């Protein structure tokens, strides 16, 4: 059943109004017609089963026939602090991490970051958030996780202090695993710092550790930047029993 996200103001008196991209997708791609059933989510954890009433080029209206709570959001809220990777790898990171349940993604500029987006930040951010929306629709999420504006490393570390904890996978770490970290973790929000292709600098690692970010190992093999965040997120969700 196709799923669409709308703002709560588009839901009024058992009628849902879908506009712009949603309307075009229903009318042009799905060839939707009155009587077809779709699922609409308000982005706040509630899903609405709806029957289409009318379809036009700019607007689709549907009546609500059932309402139920979305149960696909993880209890643990993961914020992924992803250093900007080369090429279009960021798109893959966003898509897959949102599919598995990451709550928020913060693109980070680091000392070893090669990508320069001067003058292109807004365009990139808009595209990243569209990818986030598509991924959230595809996997039935109850919200559209946000992709934040690009920030620098120190600002990201400072911001992570608002979470219940944070980890940073590091190839020189030999003892502390995510599993051992979880044993002493109490809370529901956690950050994961992932470096670029060249890794974090020595100074960045020292700064993160000095601010309470825990160094962890992801195993004996060194993972690519586009793989590490996905792996770390899956392990965290599994160890915290969200995926069981």
Image (cartoon, helix red, strand yellow):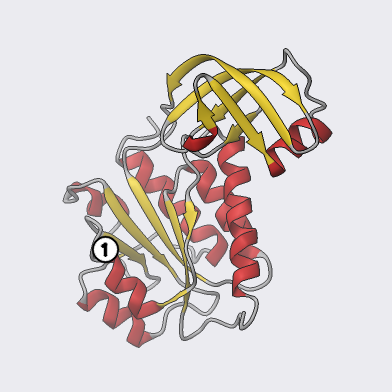
The image shows residue 113 at horizontal and vertical percentages of 53, 81
In terms of depth relative to the viewer, which is nearer, 229 or 104? 104
Residue 174 seen in render: yes
Q: Is residue 120 left or right of residue 67?
A: right
Tell me: residue 236, above or below residue 106: above
At x 26%, y 63%, the residue is: 175
Which quarter of the rendered picture does the C terminus lie within? top left
Q: Which residue is mark 1?
A: 175
In terms of depth relative to the viewer, which is nearer, 132 or 30? 30
Which quarter of the rendered picture does the N terminus lie within? top right
* SS category of the residue bearing label 1: loop
Q: Is residue 103 left or right of residue 62?
A: left
At x 64%, y 34%, the residue is: 18
Q: Is residue 26 left or right of residue 138?
A: right
The image shows residue 204 at horizontal and vertical percentages of 35, 82
The image shows residue 198 at horizontal and vertical percentages of 52, 80
At x 49%, y 66%, the residue is: 222
The image shows residue 103 at horizontal and vertical percentages of 42, 48
In terms of depth relative to the viewer, which is nearer, 202 or 222? 202
Tell me: residue 162, above or below residue 97: below
């Amino acid at each position: 059943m196709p799923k669409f996200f709308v703002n709560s103001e588009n839901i009024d008196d058992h009628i849902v109004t879908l506009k712009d991209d949603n309307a075009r997708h229903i009318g042009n791609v799905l060839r939707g017609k009155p009587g077809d059933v779709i699922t609409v989510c308000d982005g706040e954890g509630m899903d609405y089963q709806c029957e289409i009433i009318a379809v036009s080029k700019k607007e689709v209206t549907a009546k609500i026939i059932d309402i139920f709570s979305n149960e696909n959001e993880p209890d643990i809220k993961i914020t992924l602090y992803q250093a900007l990777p080369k090429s279009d790898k960021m798109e893959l990171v966003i898509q897959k991490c949102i599919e598995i349940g990451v709550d928020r993604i913060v693109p980070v500029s680091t000392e070893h970051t090669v990508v320069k987006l001067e003058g292109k930040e807004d365009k990139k951010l808009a595209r990243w958030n569209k990818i986030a929306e598509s991924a959230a629709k595809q996997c039935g999420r109850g919200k559209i996780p946000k992709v934040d504006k690009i920030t620098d490393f120190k600002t990201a570390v400072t911001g992570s202090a608002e979470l219940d904890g944070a980890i940073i996978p590091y190839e020189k770490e030999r003892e502390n695993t995510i599993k051992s970290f979880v044993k002493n973790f109490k809370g529901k929000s956690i950050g994961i710092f992932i470096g670029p292709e060249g890794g974090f600098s020595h100074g960045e690692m020292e700064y993160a550790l000095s601010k309470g970010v825990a160094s962890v190992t992801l195993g004996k093999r060194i993972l690519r930047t586009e793989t590490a965040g996905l792996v770390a997120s899956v392990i965290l969700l599994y160890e915290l029993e969200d995926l069981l």
